[in-house]
Structure formats: structure tokens, C-alpha cells
Amino acid sequence: MLGSFSFLGWMQRDALMGKQYRTFEIYLVHVDQDKCDGCEECLKFCSVDVFDFSSKAYPVRPNNCLGCGTCVAVCKSKAIIITEI
Ligand code: SF4
Ligand code: SF4
């Protein structure tokens, strides 16, 4: 039986208090191919294998992205843009 302390009850109470619930984040990973100089740093540092490489970096597994920002920090060409959606 669902009482006053049910999960739904908490959700409704917190919604009334203006809290927002997010169960997961999704990130868009974009590599500007004109800026990428092919250094492979993003490939080395991304722990969840978002990038693959031929002569430039490509975000072949963007669904893996955790939004940590490491690739953006190591990219000296400022070629990577991570956007939370
Ligand atoms: S770190 Fe930047 S410049 Fe280097 S391969 Fe990745 S996107 Fe290209
Ligand atoms: S933000 Fe983190 S998880 Fe996402 S692509 Fe960059 S290094 Fe990988």
C-alpha cells in the first residue's frame, strides 16, 4: 500500500517545492574538423572510448559521453564542443 511517504508522494511534494528530477544526462559531442590537428590527445584521455581516429578525431560513440570535459581540456586546438541536452 502506498502511504504518504511513497516515492510518488515525495516526487509530488518536491515538484511543488520547485525541485527538478533528472535520471540521466545526454551530451552532444562535436569535433570541428577544420580545427582538429590530429594530435589524438582526446582519444588517449577519454575513458569511455567516445572518439575514433583516422587522420582526425571523430565522436563515434557519443552515447558513452559522461560530460567530464577532459577532452575539451586536453584539446589544444579547441576543436571539441560538449553540449548537455
Ligand atoms: S585533442 Fe583536439 S586536435 Fe587533438 S585529435 Fe582530439 S579533437 Fe583533434
Ligand atoms: S567529455 Fe569526457 S566522456 Fe565525454 S567525450 Fe570528452 S573525455 Fe570522453
Image (cartoon, rainbow, N blue to C red):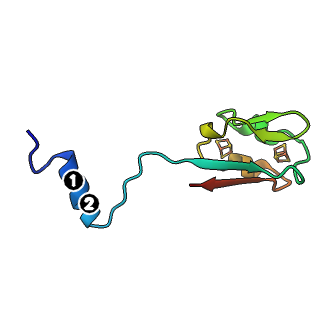
Q: Is residue 14 above or below residue 30?
A: below
Residue appearing at x 70%, y 38% in the figure: 46
Give the secondary structure at mark 1.
helix
Q: Amino acid at mark 1?
A: Trp
Q: Position of residue 12 (x, y in %)?
A: 22, 57
Q: Position of residue 16 (x, y in %)?
A: 25, 65
Q: Which residue is mark 2?
A: 14
Left or right? Give the position of 20 relative to 33: left
Q: Amino acid at mark 2?
A: Asp
Q: Are dots 1 and 2 in contact, CB under 8 Å?
A: yes
Give the secondary structure at mark 2.
helix
Q: Mark 1: give few (<14), some (14-19) or many (20+) Cα within 10 Å.
A: few
Q: Position of residue 79 (x, y in %)?
A: 81, 53
Q: Is residue 25 above or below residue 46?
A: below
Left or right? Give the position of 80 relative to 9: right
- Along the line of sight, which residue is nearer the eye, 49 or 26? 26
Q: Which residue is mark 1?
A: 10
Identify the mark at residue 23; answer none if there is no mark.
Answer: none
Q: The C terminus lies in which quarter of the figure? A: bottom right
Q: Position of residue 22 (x, y in %)?
A: 41, 51
- Quadrant for ligand 1? top right
Q: Mark 2: give few (<14), some (14-19) or many (20+) Cα within 10 Å.
A: few
Residue appearing at x 55%, y 47% in the figure: 26
Q: The N terminus lies in which quarter of the figure? A: top left
